[in-house]
Image: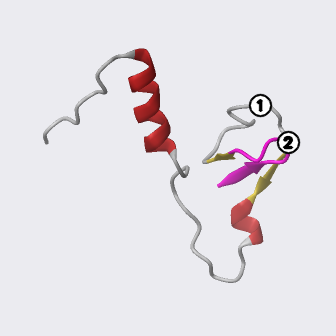
Amino acid sequence: MFECQICGVLSLGGTSCPAYGSQLRKDLSIESSDGETLPTEVPGLDDAAAAWYDLEGIEPPQPEDA
């Protein structure tokens, strides 16, 4: 997981900050050498997606049954 050094947004990958575009980012997995488990998902992403669908007035996609 990476943290943008400019705005603090967390991301899972990529070459730049998804919000700001900055390439100044910190790899949090390198700093966590004390055995702490880091999140594998961006915190609040599901809430942000739900808010976006609500703002746009559209129905969110339904999960496909396997």
Q: Residue at x 63, y 82 (%)?
A: 35
Residue 55 position within the rendered picture, expressed as x and y whole percent measured from the top left: 45, 21
Picture colour scheme: secondary structure
Examine the rendered structure and indicate whether residue 15 appears above or below residue 52.
Answer: below
> Closer to the N terminus: mark 1 or mark 2?
2
Q: Which mark is residue 6?
A: 2
Alpha-carbon span between mark 1 and mark 2: 8 Å
**In this picture, residue 12 sits left or right of residue 62:** right
Q: Quadrant of residue 21?
A: top right
The three-letter amino acid code for the residue at tag 1 is Tyr
Q: What are the residue bounds of the magenta stretch?
A: 1-9
Q: Residue at x 67, y 38 (%)?
A: 14
Does the magenta-highlighted stretch encompass residue 3?
yes
Depth order, front residue of 66/62: 62
Q: Residues within 10 Å of mark 1 (few under 14, many from 20)?
A: few
**In this picture, residue 17 sits left or right of residue 12:** right
Secondary structure of residue under mark 1: loop
Examine the rendered structure and indicate whether residue 24 appears above or below residue 50.
Answer: below
**In this picture, residue 40 sits left or right of residue 21:** left
- The residue at which mark 1 appears reads as 20
Q: Residue at x 33, y 17 (%)?
A: 58
Does the magenta-highlighted stretch encompass residue 35?
no
